[in-house]
Amino acid sequence: DVKVTQSSRYLVKRTGEKVFLECVQDMDHENMFWYRQDPGLGLRLIYFSYDVKMKEKGDIPEGYSVSREKKERFSLILESASTNQTSMYLCASSSPSEYNEQFFGPGTRLTVL
Amino acid sequence: GQQLNQSPQSMFIQEGEDVSMNCTSSSIFNTWLWYKQEPGEGPVLLIALYKAGELTSNGRLTAQFGITRKDSFLNISASIPSDVGIYFCAGQLHQFYFGTGTSLTVIP
């Protein structure tokens, strides 16, 4: 079974803090994605990566950065957290041959106070 | 980004009833996907559609890729309590775009 794990299920941070959200997949997938999920807005793509050290902006990259130093790990970074970044963050991975099937992690619910 | 309009936003149905939800877009997609998300979990892929007009089933679930490539629907027949969750459509062109979700409640 494909496993995508995220470092925390719940996280509470203060405005201005630097926040790291970690995602690890165990299926040797090349593609990895970060989304945020908000009520009434569905899932919106923040960043994605097709290979190690490679990253591309999604629809809402402002206020976020990412890091992909190893194939299995894709990190989302909030340089200076703000209250409007309170959300559910979902990581996903897929392989190029089955690109359309994205496997999602359980999500991290981040609250910024 | 692309906007996918998913309806209805929520549904409350009796166990045994059929369910229908749909997704429309102003853009053409190459692929349509349907996901289900249960509380506290990430979305799980239910059905993937790759060709306009394609009709695909997965157990009690049936989904179709619209002829115009701008819409898709998902039907669930004879609903059961474990069908509860949020159902998302997603369209893929170069990246994935997700609908706003349909929250399904099944009353035993």
Image: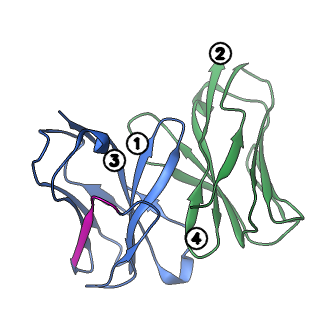
Chain colours: A blue, B green
Query: Looking at the picture, does residue B19 appear above or below residue B34?
Result: above
Question: In the image, A25: left or right of B105?
Answer: left
1 and 3 marks on the same chain: no
Give the number of callouts: 4
Q: Which residue is mark 1?
A: B41
Q: Residues within 10 Å of mark 4 (few under 14, many from 20)?
A: many
Query: In 3D space, how far apart are the residues under numbered discs 2 and 3 (Cα atoms)?
Result: 27 Å
Numbered mark located on residue A107 in the image: 3
Circle 3 chain: A
Could you tell me the amino acid type at mark 4?
Asn
Circle 2 chain: B
Which is closer to the viewer, label 2 or label 3? 3
Q: Secondary structure at mark 2?
A: strand
- Decide whether residue B38 is among the magenta residues: no
Q: Is residue A79 visible?
A: yes
Upstream in sequence: badge 3 or badge 4: 4
Query: What percent of the width, then of the height, locates residue A28?
Result: 34, 79
Query: What percent of the width, then of the height, locates residue A85?
Result: 29, 45
Which is closer to the viewer, label 2 or label 4? 4
Q: Secondary structure at mark 3?
A: loop
Q: Are marks 1 and 3 in contact (CB under 8 Å)?
A: yes
Q: Which residue is mark 4?
A: A100
Query: In 3D space, how far apart are the residues under numbered discs 1 and 4 (Cα atoms)?
Result: 19 Å
Name the quadrant of the N terminus of chain B.
bottom right
Query: Looking at the picture, does residue B108 appear above or below residue B7?
Result: above
User: Residue A22 lies in what quarter of the image?
Assistant: bottom left
